[in-house]
Image (cartoon, rainbow, N blue to C red):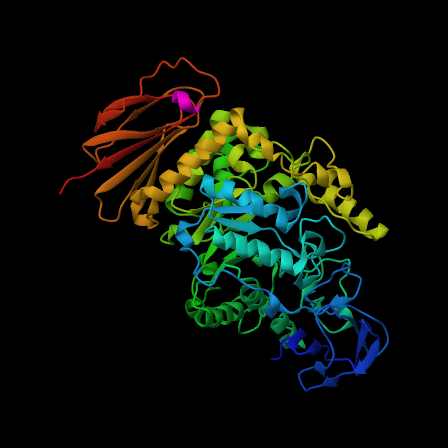
Amino acid sequence: MKKAGAFYLGNGRCRFTVWAPEKKQMVLHLIYPEERKLQMQSDSEGFYTLEVETTYPGTRYFYMPDGEQDYPDPASFHQPDGVHESSAVIDHAAYTWQDGSWRGLPFQDLVLYELHVGTFTPEGTFAAIIPRLEELVETGLNAIELMPVAAFPGHRNWGYDGVYPYAVQNSYGGPEGLKLLVNACHARGIAVFLDVVYNHLGPEGNYLSQFGPYFTDQYNSPWGDAINFDGAWSDGVRAYISDNPLYWFEHYHLDGLRFDAIHAVIDNGAVHIWELIHRKVRKLEQRLGRRLYLTAESDYNSPRVVKNPEVGGYGFEAQWLDDFHHALYVLLDSKGQERYVDFGKMEQLAKAYNDGFVHSGEYVSFRKRRHGASSAGIAGDQFIVFNLNHDQAGNRAKGERLSVLINTDRLKLAAAALLLSPYVPLLFMGEEYAEESPFFYFVSHSDKELIHAVREGRRKEFASYKWEVQPPDPQAEETFENSKLSWEKRREGKNRLLLDWHRTLISLRRSHPVLQEFSKNCTRAHVMGSQGLLLHRQTEDGLQHLICLFNFSETSLPCPLPDWSPDWQLILDSTATEWQVRKKNRKEVIPGKAKANHSLQLPPLTVLVYEGRLEL
């Protein structure tokens, strides 16, 4: 099918294409630099097309379905004045890329860093991120994952209310700003991922229904009208959505996409939309000569998300592993079980390490049904794990990060549990230095009724979390401003210590061969008592071993060193003086070297890592 959008062809020529299968006519309304109204030609698939002379980048235009009223282009590449105003012609070929030698990074080598453009810096722009990249590299972070940047109403939003999937938010810096950021990242060895939303579009500025049957009432979506992936006229909708990943990869040189809540997309067609996207991206991959990664947020707890479409899967590279977060968080925060009633056992964290999904067919009281399927045998680099993300903080009334909920010793445990795991880790912006500023949910709508609906919906949607206070007003500017990072904190005190702790863990993860092994056969977690865990990892040849000993309790825990190696060398000790905010007198003696079966006392809230080798 044709691609929708305004494609600048050079020499003042531009081809405009819009999909509107049930309209009798379509008028292209050019409004700047000179006003013209031009009739477009239709085809049998419902596309209207017109190639226009003397039309240059910067030209502003609307479409007039049936010649009646101006609306922005549904496939607009740029909305310079916001979601309600005219669309603008841009020339993607005009940008001079300097990343010709960039071929991406192996997925298993990534340490992802989720960030929100508007709150990462005081300026809230793509350009303002660039000076901070060096410090991210020094920490060991090599992939940023941008929360959605598709054009949304106003200048502050999480991004999940985007209404123009092809247009980059104007207040962030628009198309040019995103390209500058990606170019700068690649120059520093940083991959760039983008969060995209195909389960719904936001309400304000959403004019797609004026053009065609983009939505359906056959299904329901928690956040807006369900997208029409399998009903009448759905071919055009499927093309509109499935071409969007190609657009980001080709014109913005992105390395990967994170697909929001794929479980909220319903498609009962013979070829699921995820399979269609997978096929298109693989073809583009061959043409571009580099890997293009597709990752998913999924509530299915099903291995089919990462299986190849040839065997009935969706074809994603990896999926977020929420069960890992839930199992670990409840062990770190005594109040955690109030939010995650089906978690709280050390055996569940062990299962998260050994298999992946904790809920793999068991009855789950939160859902009042059985949930999930086994992921045993799915390689570790097909899961993304985290201790914090935008949802975990934003879905609290006070927007608390993990750093506000637990103490420093527990934060060290959390970071080690994450970065020593056989999975691809993700940090949320500021987590590496224990940022304490909240991360709230915020919007900047202009429709008063919609603002009221968002406020009320916010209160009702999360009533089950038993908030003790009311959440701040999502519409208030102050809510947005209070969510910005305090970057200077990373240089002193507890924050500097935790930053160095993350650096050390990431460096160990990147340099030790055992931590670069993702086969489930090379990982085994064992429960020690009720609050201890021994994570055993080894190379595939069985010659190199690591044991990571975790004590989540407030008391010492006896632990005999196993006999997988005759000798053990201590390589990381969270109780060492260098990792203490204040010097402590510890009773336990931690041996730097020990023989197999040596019994040691694991201090409270501690992680120790020992290295062992077998000689041939």
Residue 300 visible at all: no
**In front of the other: 489 or 418:** 489
**In front of the other: 475 or 127:** 127
Q: Is 578 covered by the magenta stretch?
A: yes
Q: Residue at (44%, 42%) from the top-left corner?
A: 140
Residue 175 point in image, percent of width and height: 64, 60
Compared across the picture, whether 405 is left or right of 292 comes to right
Q: Quadrant of the N terminus?
A: bottom right
Residue 78 point in image, percent of width and height: 70, 64
Q: Main structural element of the magenta stretch: helix, strand or loop?
A: helix
Compared across the picture, whether 96 is left or right of 159 comes to left
Residue 495 visible at all: yes
**In front of the other: 11 or 149:** 11
Question: How many numbered discs, if any?
Answer: 0
Q: Is 85 covered by the magenta stretch?
A: no
Q: Residue at (40%, 35%) from the top-left corner?
A: 504
Q: Which residues are magenta?
A: 575-579
Residue 529 point in image, percent of width and height: 37, 27
453 lies above or below 251: above
- Image quarter of residue 395: top right
Q: Quadrant of the C terminus?
A: top left
- Image quarter of residue 437: top right
- Image quarter of residue 550: top left
